[in-house]
Amino acid sequence: MKFVMPRDITIPSIFGHSVEFKKGVPTHVPPKLWPEAMAADGVAEDTELVLEAEKEQTAAERLKQIFMAYEEIMKRGEPNDLAKGGEPHARVVSGLVGFSVSVAERDSSWAAFQKKFGESK
């Protein structure tokens, strides 16, 4: 599948590949690198295929993985992982879980995480 980036960027991967993007130019991305491309603000040309892959996960599985990402972010204590309001950036969460997490999903899951574990912003 091809992704389009809003800026020039090279995305390295733990799989030994890297993909170089030019702003606005559709570029082929191997399936293993789709999560990294989405985490870097890439937009898939065939969003239907991406949405189908994401539907395969149950809501409970997604939430569990997102909560684990929040725990990792809190352990790391990196200020750049957090937005001004203290919540983790959706792109950072997406990079840790390996699938796209929207800002709306981040907001609702962050509120649930705080309620369950007593974390404060």
Image (cartoon, rainbow, N blue to C red):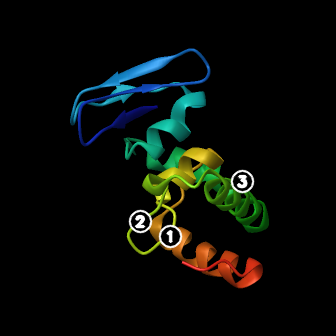
The residues bearing labels 3 and 1 have C-alpha atoms spaced at a distance of 27 Å
Q: Which of marks 3 and 1 is in front?
A: 1
Residue 87's disc is: 1
Q: Residue beneath label 2, please?
A: 83
Kind of element beneath mark 1: loop
Which residue is located at x 54 percent, y 25 percent?
13
Above-or-below relation of 16 to 112: above
Counting residues from the start of the chain, the first of labels 3 and 1 encountered is 3
Q: Nearer the viewer, mark 2 or mark 3?
A: 2
Percent coordinates x, y for residue 115 in the rendering: 70, 85
Marks 3 and 1: CB-CB under 8 Å? no
Which residue is located at x 45 percent, y 37 percent?
37
Kind of element beneath mark 3: loop
User: Amino acid type of disc 3?
Assistant: Glu
Q: Extreme bottom residue here?
A: 115
User: Amino acid type of disc 2?
Assistant: Ala
Specify whether 111 is left or right of 27. right
Percent coordinates x, y for residue 98 in the rendering: 62, 44
The residues bearing labels 2 and 3 have C-alpha atoms spaced at a distance of 29 Å
Percent coordinates x, y for residue 94 in the rendering: 55, 51
**Quadrant location, the C terminus:** bottom right
Residue 56's disc is: 3
Q: Extreme top residue here?
A: 16
Marks 1 and 2: CB-CB under 8 Å? yes
CA neighbours of label 1 inside 10 A, class few (<14), some (14 to 19), many (20+):
some
Kind of element beneath mark 2: loop
